[in-house]
Amino acid sequence: MNNSNRPTWPETWINFVELIAKRSCDPKTKVAAAIISADNTCVLSLGYNGPPHNFPHERLSLEDGKSGFIHAEQNCYYKLTYSDLREKILYTLFSPCYDCAMGAIQCRINRIVYKQPFRDISGIELIQKTNIEIYSLEQANILALADLWGTDSTKEARQQYLLKNA
């Protein structure tokens, strides 16, 4: 069987997150995130941007950063079972903002994959100071196609491969 059209795991989970984002009631920006076990066998949590439970499904403002909505990553963290000690990958449509990056650290996320950078890259900068790996979807796909995405490869092997093949 030819697997040339078979999506990588990072592509699969970003496609999943894009579908979940359609649930957002935000007319301006629909965002979603999912936390997946590193072996790709289990969805551990998911969330999308929106108001708190039982609040109106309306933005407070169309101005960036003032929607009044909970971020997709935060909704994901709230639903995560913290006693699950498996390695976790956060897939999200935008790189995390600073507060969501702090949440990823607190939730012991091991890797983050984002489709596009958020307007403020302070979250990426914070994550880069930790042991959490953070990759664009493009980088994650390069690693997946080189068979370096699974749990049997190491962070060091992934980083060295990207340096050599960037």
Image: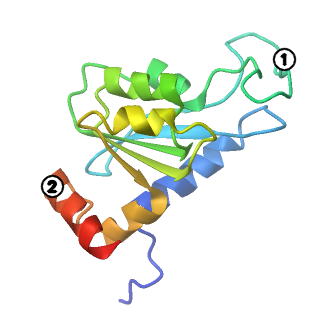
- 155 displayed left or right of 73: left
Tag in front: 2 or 1: 2
- 24 displayed left or right of 73: right
Q: Disc 2 marks which residue? A: 156
Disc sitting over residue 27 in the figure = none
37 vs 120, nearest the viewer: 120
Q: Residue at x 48, y 81 (%)?
A: 5
44 vs 94, nearest the viewer: 94
Q: Residue at x 56, y 57 (%)?
A: 15
Q: Position of residue 7 (x, y in %)?
A: 45, 70
Which residue occupies the extreme top position in the image?
54
Q: Position of residue 116 (x, y in %)?
A: 57, 52
51 vs 120, nearest the viewer: 120
Tell me the element at label 1.
Answer: loop
- 126 displayed left or right of 56: left
Q: What is the quadrant of residue 22 in the picture?
A: top right
**Classed neighbour count for the residue bearing mark 2: other residues with Cα under 10 Å, few (<14), some (14–19), many (≥20):** few
Can residue 111 be seen here? The reply is yes
Q: How many marks?
A: 2
Q: Quadrant of the N terminus?
A: bottom left
Q: Residue at x 23, y 65 (%)?
A: 148
Q: Amino acid at mark 1?
A: Leu
Q: Position of residue 46 (x, y in %)?
A: 51, 34
Tell me: residue 9, above or below residue 59.
below
Q: Quadrant of the C terminus?
A: bottom left
Q: CA distance from mark 2 to mark 1?
A: 44 Å
Tell me: residue 138, above or below residue 64.
below
Q: Position of residue 68 (x, y in %)?
A: 74, 17
Q: Disc 1 marks which residue? A: 60
